[in-house]
Image: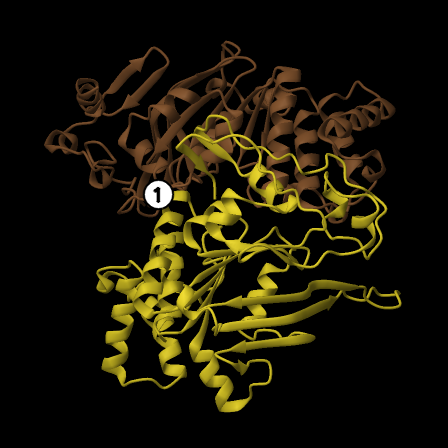
Amino acid sequence: MAEGRHNPLLELRDIRKTYRTRRSLFGSGGREVVALNSVSLEIYHGEIFGLVGESGSGKTTVGRLIVRLEDPEQGSIRLEGVEVTKLRGKALRDFRRKVQMIFQDPYQSLNPQLSVFDTVSEPLTVHRIGNSSQREEQVRKALTAAGLSPPEDYVFRYPHQLSGGQRQRVAIARAMVLKPSFIVADEPTSMLDASISAQIFNILIEMREKLDATLLFITHSLAAARYLCDRIAVIYKGNLMEIGSADEIIQNPIHPYTRALLDALPRFGDCGEMKYYGTLLGREREYVEPSACPFFPRCRPADETKCSRDKPLLKEIFPSHFVACFEPDLKQAEGSGGDTCFYGT
Amino acid sequence: MLLEVENLSVGYQTKKGFLKAVEEVSFTLEKGKSLGLVGESGCGKTTIGMALMGLLPPNGAVTGGRVMFEGHDLLKMSERELRGIRWRKIAMIFQAAMNALNPVHRVDDQIAEAILTHNPQISKEEAVKQVEELFELVGIPKTRMRDYPHQYSGGMKQRAIIAMALACRPKLIIADEPTTALDVIVQHQILQETKNLQKEFNISIIFISHDISIVADVCHHIGIMYAGQLVEYGRREEVFNNPMHYYTKALLSSYPTLSREKKQLLPIPGDAPNLVEPPPGCRFCDRCSASGATCKTGPPEWVEITPTHRALCDRCLEDCGERKHKS
């Protein structure tokens, strides 16, 4: 996606978001939890960008901020150069048409009282697009593109009559029907079986081609991100740890946390000599300064003095490969891995 | 042989008719070994686990077969006899087991209670000591024993449940999706620990999962299930390095690899058949890349590839013959 390098479609600058825990009945007030700590990202036109992290890393918060389900405390979000956080009225409505989200759980994201047709046509009605026959045609097209064909078999069904994979495809059709230019897909396959996940991945790739859309793919799995994404960012406790091209992150991971994630991927088949980094501490360090590197408590190669005091910033270590680590170990682990080594997603 | 399952069939009475959830499934499990049962949702894998424990819901019933556990048929036992075996000899870790902890009791009390219920002869102090040992085994620090479940992370809750399953030193553990909903790193740690515990106590485990990658590392044998039937069974290396059934092959190609060459994922087209009126022939043939005219008409036969590896597919050896000719 080199052609669009200079003008990112979406730009996040120093985003900070905190949540306050609920006050207890007698307590003096909630504790502040930092969900995102000065996160900056650029996503270019036409790319699928992967945001990889564990639960609680803040990855879903990034997605929710982008579609403006929430507002950041600090920082700016720009889509096509326009500040998103300040949009009001008609501009906001237009924005909502351009940006769509696919949620994690298709068992909860669909209204059980709406048929497939009503679900997919609702965004068109809300945005007053087309007349009824045009809408019908668009719903038909979206369903077919999402792999629900022939659409006639599905339009009158309700969510409870669909399997998990079919529901997620309805959710995708609903996101597609407005022809958005930016789509946030938040773990769209974590509730689905492997063979169904593969279908969803391939539909998302087709969707990018068909709609000329840009995608943010939020996932916990580096293997899934590698398959789907052009670039990957790894997030840990609200901090970006490593950003690079998908191949670079998988073949040449630098940050100890990325390496620990790769070590932990479940794998099977003919794996031969596998790379193993062993960067995760068996027992977490207990007393850690709040200013320390967020991964310091679990990091084996950490420098006890430096990493315990300050938080490293992202640095460009190889061209377009950024790592937030004071003393990154550039040496890669030995091992090739068999060609038929499969990974869980 | 610790467990021998022979031609087990289970069905559910539903509004649309009698649903044959599991049909003629046979496998064996030796002491200290583990078996992974893998299949997509609705293939009957959880039903097998429930049938073994005698915990089928009211509309479910075993319609045939034998389940021999230490020489006794579990299916012929009374509820009373089963209660003597459940938890003491066969423990089960359920799907989303972490929600099984009672939120208003401290974790160590809950596990001590489980121990006391099944061994009324031991004292409370003895039970608490056992809990301490169990927590050490599964890697929960002693300082967290007196916590309530909500103070635990997902991984710790899962560890506590594993501790509970180990409490009565069972011979067999049935673990149904034990790590679903856990993060990759935590999942990895728990799977490794399970493997160590299994070796240490010589426990047999049946792992049930929709995800091959989870069972691959911990299981000695793998059974692939499709639409209520076991379609391939063998040692782990045999099934992964030389998959014979076309469903297994298709399933494997829907997982990504991380090798330098990015491989296209090939999803399996179509849907699984309706199990109220299953097709007369091979149940996978509508989605199979190699199905022929004979596949649809009659049920497929088991083909033995090696003494420990078999597949329920008439055509799997034809392909194998071709491959041999080529090489």
Decide which of B275, B215 is in the foreground and name it: B215
Q: For the point 41% across and 31% down, which residue is it? A: B61
From what the image shows, is residue A246 above or below residue B110? below
Q: Chain of mark 1?
A: B
Q: Position of residue A163 (x, y in %)?
A: 37, 52
Corner quadrant of residue B241: top left
Colour-to-chain, brown: B
Corner quadrant of residue A229: bottom left
Q: Residue furthest bottom?
A: A90
From what the image shows, is residue A166 above or below residue B75? below
Q: For the point 70% across and 30% down, which residue is it? A: B163
Instruction: Determine whether, in the image, residue A138 is placed left or right of residue A343.
Output: left
Q: Which residue is mark 1?
A: B263
Label 1 element class? loop
Instruction: Determine whether, in the image, residue B52 is placed left or right of residue B309.
Output: right
Name the image colouring: by chain
Instruction: Determine whether, in the image, residue A313 is placed left or right of residue A190.
Output: right
Q: Position of residue B19 (x, y in %)?
A: 33, 39
Say whether residue A163 is visible.
no
Pointer 1 local density, CA inside 10 Å: few below 14, some 14–19, many at least 20: some
Q: For the point 74% across and 21% down, which residue is it? A: B119
Colour-to-chain, yellow: A
Q: Position of residue B206 (x, y in %)?
A: 51, 25
Amino acid type at mark 1: Lys
Q: Position of residue B135 (x, y in %)?
A: 76, 30
Q: Residue furthest left?
A: B293
Say whether residue A189 is visible.
yes
Decide which of A316, A128 is in the foreground and name it: A316
* Quadrant placement of the N terminus of chain A: bottom left
